[in-house]
Image (cartoon, rainbow, N blue to C red):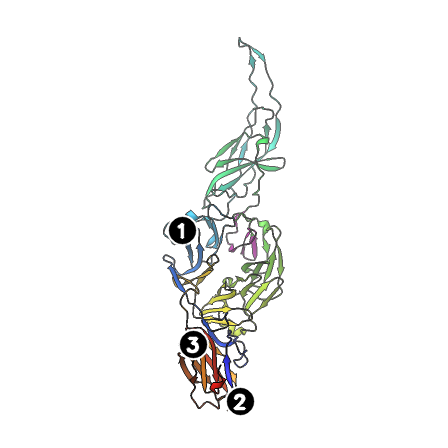
Amino acid sequence: MKIALANFQGEIPILDARLLPESNAQVARNVYLKRGTLKPHNGISAVQSLPGVTNPANLYHYDQGNDGDGFWFSWGDQYDVDVVRSPIADDAYGRVYWTGQGAPKMSAIDMATAGSGPYPSSWYALGVPAPDSAPVASEPSTRAEPDPITNEDGDTVEIPEFPPSTALQTAYVVTLVTEFGEEGPPSDPSNFLLRWDNVEGNPAGGEVVVDLPGVPTGAQNIVSKRLYRVESGQYQRVADIPAATGSYTDEVPSQGLGVSLRSLYWDAPNPEMTGLTLLPNGVLTGFFGSTLAFSEAYLPHAWPTGYQLAFDDPVVAIAAISGGLVVATTGQPWLVTGSSPAAMAQMKLDVNQPCAAKRSMVDMGGFAIYASYDGLVAAGGSDARVVTREVLSKEQWLALKPETIRAFRYDGAYLAFYEGGAFLFTPGQGIEFFDYEASAGYYDVTRDTLYLIIGNGIYAWDKGAPLTLTWRSKLFEFPPGSAGFSCAKVIAYGYPVRLRVIADGSPVIEHDAAGPDMFRLPAGFTLCREWELEVISDHEVTSVQIATSPGELI
């Protein structure tokens, strides 16, 4: 009779130790199980400290500049920040956008990385405001008369007539434009007036003086005003005017007008918006209250209110997956789909699982996982379900304080840090725990590295020295007197490996195996009914065995 373990998996805490599958564990800590062996998981490696930030709890790696090393953006625990890069490929300004630090913000590389840190150094408000007031247009002056034709003696011989002009009713609006070419919504329209439009070279009477509105105060980086004139039912561009200019004389004929006004609905985002997320089609999305908002495609400053969607309950977290956008609320989750921000459709998923923590939401590819109060919920397609229901009881789950979870997709699994530790969950393979806590993290896809804030420093996950693993088997039951185990063997890629053999809850032996050779177990435990094996190691272990005779060991 023997116990031979050569395939190792994680914990299923909901099951009694006697009912666990043979490969699963009562305890799986600091262990990498994807090889089927007991391999110590690598620890963390120090990257740098975060001076100047009190209680850092938000992290982002801005990797444009500094010879490829990039810059670390961090914020204190009074904020809950979400950051996205510009959706514009090869953005000349290297812009970055974020929410959670008051009203939504944006910055460019030269601003964000100025000085010695902490970063970001400075920023502008996201969005472009409308002017505070409408422009005022002055009625054109009396039409000029043509110059008379005189002879050599100076006598008038002819009074010519100008070619005909057309009287048009018109009005003006003004938009504001930033240094980055971002245009905001228009002002209220000016007064209407008649304007003579010159045709066939007629120079007379076409001028209109427009008094321009001022520029609102605030950190918007406004550099110019854009004047539009309405004709034939649409506003068309007249001119760009420096922001400080107070008036403009419009002499542009109808045929000289520019493009039509596009920014009629390009509002700034709601100042309470958070959860900023980039969708695959260049659209940014975020939420405030029970409302989900979308930007114009590739125009992160423009957030039309007509693109907003309302939900039954306040939104807690969102995640962009391959099939759409998962929206977790204080009630049921939703799936939002669509290729255009103007035509997004929302579908309620039929499961009553509120989201317990915004930072628990993770895009896993074809679905998203978030923490509810019953366990981890996987949502995607038309379905949502609690995927830890067969791994953790509700009481065991709540003991992990799901409201404190900050999670990441790592190596195809769900890696979560909570108040008290960390765990790695892979559907169908159980759960493993780690001896780490982290206040924030950032997964850098270009470096395939997860960076964590621990204390006041940044550390790279899985880049340090191997940890010491602990793995305890299920509880094996035998009839009393039938399990007279007398010998054991540990096969590993390195030694020593500590093996603990436990019988009826009492230690039989705690042995540091120095090699693959058999070693003896003490006598006196033949009547024991319940047996457990526990491995503690800094080396990878492939097999653990105990047997009643040496000939049974492999």
Residue 269 belongs to magenta span:
yes
Q: Residue furthest top?
A: 153
The residue identified by callout 1 is 67
Q: What distance separates the C-alpha of mark 2 from that of mark 1?
A: 68 Å
Q: Residues within 10 Å of mark 3 (few under 14, many from 20)?
A: many
Q: Which mark is residue 479?
A: 2
The residue identified by callout 3 is 536
Q: Residues within 10 Å of mark 2 (few under 14, many from 20)?
A: few
Q: Which mark is residue 114?
A: none
Residue 415 position within the rendered picture, expressed as x and y whole percent measured from the top left: 49, 66
Residue 488 lies in quadrant: bottom left
Q: Is residue 332 visible?
A: no
Q: Is residue 545 visible?
A: yes
Note whether 526 is above or below 118 in the view shown. Answer: below
Residue 283 belongs to magenta span:
yes
Q: Which residues are magenta?
A: 267-293
